[in-house]
Amino acid sequence: GAGVSQSPSNKVTEKGKDVELRCDPISGHTALYWYRQSLGQGLEFLIYFQGNSAPDKSGLPSDRFSAERTGGSVSTLTIQRTQQEDSAVYLCASSSFTGSQYFGPGTRLLVL
Amino acid sequence: AQKITQTQPGMFVQEKEAVTLDCTYDTSDPSYGLFWYKQPSSGEMIFLIYQGSYDQQNATEGRYSLNFQKARKSANLVISASQLGDSAMYFCAMREGQGSGSRLTFGEGTQLTVNP
């Protein structure tokens, strides 16, 4: 399909392990966003990429979180030394320069 | 202060009736955009409708319309002729500044239940 895709759809990990979450944006979209949604909550901004500009990392909750975007397309969000409070749905969105954000299906992360 | 406020944690409506979901916002930026998203139980975020701060007319998309009252800083979503499939969580969100160059700030959401 032509939408935003994310993998894996579900991830269960043990406390202290590292995880990588992947986002494949809509082709041609220059902007890519990561958000986190804890159970029953609204979405919390994490990080934003726009073209070749330096990313806006102001929403990352700790230095255990990092993200990169290779070739202006696919992005990977990495969480090191996972904690139980990292359990959430991680949502990726992309948009054209002036457009609305379209979301992927999310990755449900459970840290045991 | 909350940037986006949705005061209705839950709403109920009868099938085929109209329902209004409330959203108020707070910004000092003259250029901003307001969005509504639907999140069914499956979890995906579905874009519904967008209103720019400089738009003269209220946005409409099929059965969805946005009642934009700029002076009151409100951007209520109106769903006409509700359907059972409209049952979902609805989020209001705001983007401050021009273009896509900034994050969305979301409200806490309203859980809508459509009764047969």
Image (cartoon, coloured by chain):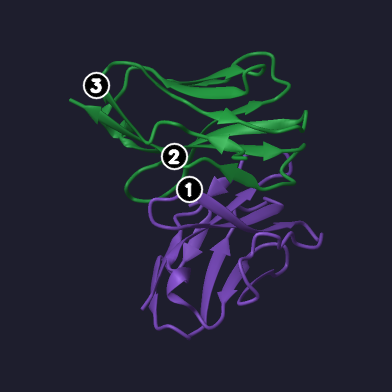
Chain colours: A purple, B green
Which amino acid lies under the numbered mark 2 shown in the image of this protein?
Answer: Gly
- Residue A30 rendering spot, x and y as whole percentages: 71, 52
Query: Are discs 2 and 1 less than 8 Å apart at CB?
Result: yes
In the figure, B90 relative to A74: above or below?
above
In the image, what residue occupies the spot 62% across and 18% down? B72
Subunit bearing disc 1: A
Dot 2 falls on a residue whose secondary structure is: loop
- Mark 3 Cα shell of 10 Å, populated few (<14), some (14-19), many (≥20): some
Disc nearest the viewer among 3 and 2: 2
Question: x, y (%) of residue A55?
Answer: 75, 62
Up/down of A1 relative to A55, above or below: above
| Image mark for residue B35 | none
Q: Left or right: where does residue B13 sit relative to residue B19?
A: left
Q: Gap in Å between the C-alphas at discs 3 and 2?
A: 21 Å
Chain containing the residue with disc 3: B
Q: Secondary structure at mark 1?
A: loop
Which label was assigned to residue B109?
Answer: 2
Q: In the visual, does A2 lie left or right of B95?
A: left
As measured in the structure, the alpha-carbon distance from the residue carrying label 2 to the one carrying label 1 is 6 Å
The quarter of the rendered structure image containing the C terminus of chain B is top left
**At 49% across and 79% down in the image, what residue appears?**
A82
**Is disc 2 in the same subunit as disc 1?**
no
Q: Nearer the viewer, residue A31 or B35?
A: B35
Residue A49 location (% of width, % of height):
71, 58
Task: Indicate the quadrant where residue B87 lies.
Answer: top left
Badge 1 amino acid:
Gly
Q: Identify the amino acid type marked 3.
A: Glu
Q: Residue furthest bottom?
A: A16
Q: Is residue A99 visible?
A: no
Where is mark 3, residue-wise?
B15
